[in-house]
Amino acid sequence: MVICSTVPRSAAARWHIRRTVLGGIGLLLTACPAPTPAVSSPPGVVPPPPAIASPKTAPAGATSDTAAGGVPVAAPVAAPSLGAVLAAQAAAQGQAAEPVAPAAADPESAEIVKAIEEMYGMAANAPIDVLEIRLDGPLYRITFQARGAGKGSTTTVFVSRDGKMAYQDGFDLRERLKQMRMEKGFAECMRLAGLHVYGLLNDEETRKQLAEIGGFAGAVFIDCAAGKENCARLGVKVFPSLEFRGKTEAGFKQRNYLESLTGCK
């Protein structure tokens, strides 16, 4: 959509290149052509072409809101704030807005960014560099890094627009629930099949085995530090060790092996 304006040419030139996308509608403001006054001529006489006015110099002391000759002109309409544009985009398009460079962040997020820089700066004992600010629905998604930290060591924090609620490293609720159901089902299936994992919680290989099983590995785990008699009875000396249907195997086992051994998925 193109809208013309009667602001002076200097101001119109500035607005000609300003384009704001709001709700998927493009607005382009440009200067309107000056109206041509009607000229009355006697019948049969062709009127002469209109004279081209020579440029005038604005009088000394004239402001940007006063045209040459002292005629007042309405000031340009202020552009909508960055926060309003991003919010309108997210609401109209149903998706997160484009990233905003930290230096161009709208005033609504300035106080939140300062709080994050101070809080995480104290924790890291180093200055914090904000890498990206994004409007993600009703939340600010702010990604930052402690200065001097290596690549891949960024942190993401989600903060409500009013700054009262914040949480770190958000996750997809439905995907997390799906993953937990699968892990629980896998561990319960192996328990019912008769699998036991013997080990020590302070042993690195044991923790690796439990992580391979998933978040519900406790269903099949037996801690040899608490139940030494069980481990001694089976002659378990290597951790972790697996017992299944009277047979004991030492060492870490990958998930695909556990699946083939027990028939659980």
Image (cartoon, grey):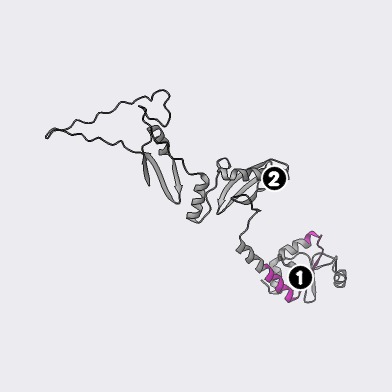
Q: Residue 119 got which mark?
A: 2
Residue at far top of view: 60
Q: Position of residue 83 (x, y in %)?
A: 53, 46
Is 68 located above or below residue 74 in the figure?
above
Q: Residues within 10 Å of mark 2 (few under 14, many from 20)?
A: few
- What span is colored magenta in the figure? 183-205
Furthest-left residue in view?
44
In screen coordinates, is 234 left or right of 126? right
On screen, residue 3 versus residue 263, left or right, reads left
Q: Tag 1's secondary structure?
A: loop
Indicate the quadrant containing the C terminus: top left, top right, bottom left or bottom right.
bottom right
Name the disc covering residue 220, or none: 1
Q: Residue 22, percent across and down? A: 45, 49
What amino acid is found at the position of numbered circle 2 in the picture?
Answer: Met
Instruction: Say left or right for 240 vs 260.
Output: right
Q: Secondary structure at mark 2?
A: helix
Compare residues 180 and 249 and report the one nearer the observer: 180
Q: Which of the two discs, 1 and 2, labels the residue nearer the N terminus?
A: 2
Q: Residue at x 48, y 55 (%)?
A: 93
Q: Nearer the viewer, residue 212 or 227?
A: 227
**Residue 141 location, x and y as percent?**
60, 50
Does the CB distance between marks 1 and 2 fall below 8 Å? no
Give residue 17's mark.
none
Tell me which amino acid carries mark 1.
Val
Q: Bin the neighbour count of mark 1 within 10 Å (Cα to Cα): few under 14, some 14-19, many 20 and up.
A: many
Label 1 – label 2 distance at C-alpha: 41 Å
Q: Residue 12: image x %, image y %?
A: 39, 36
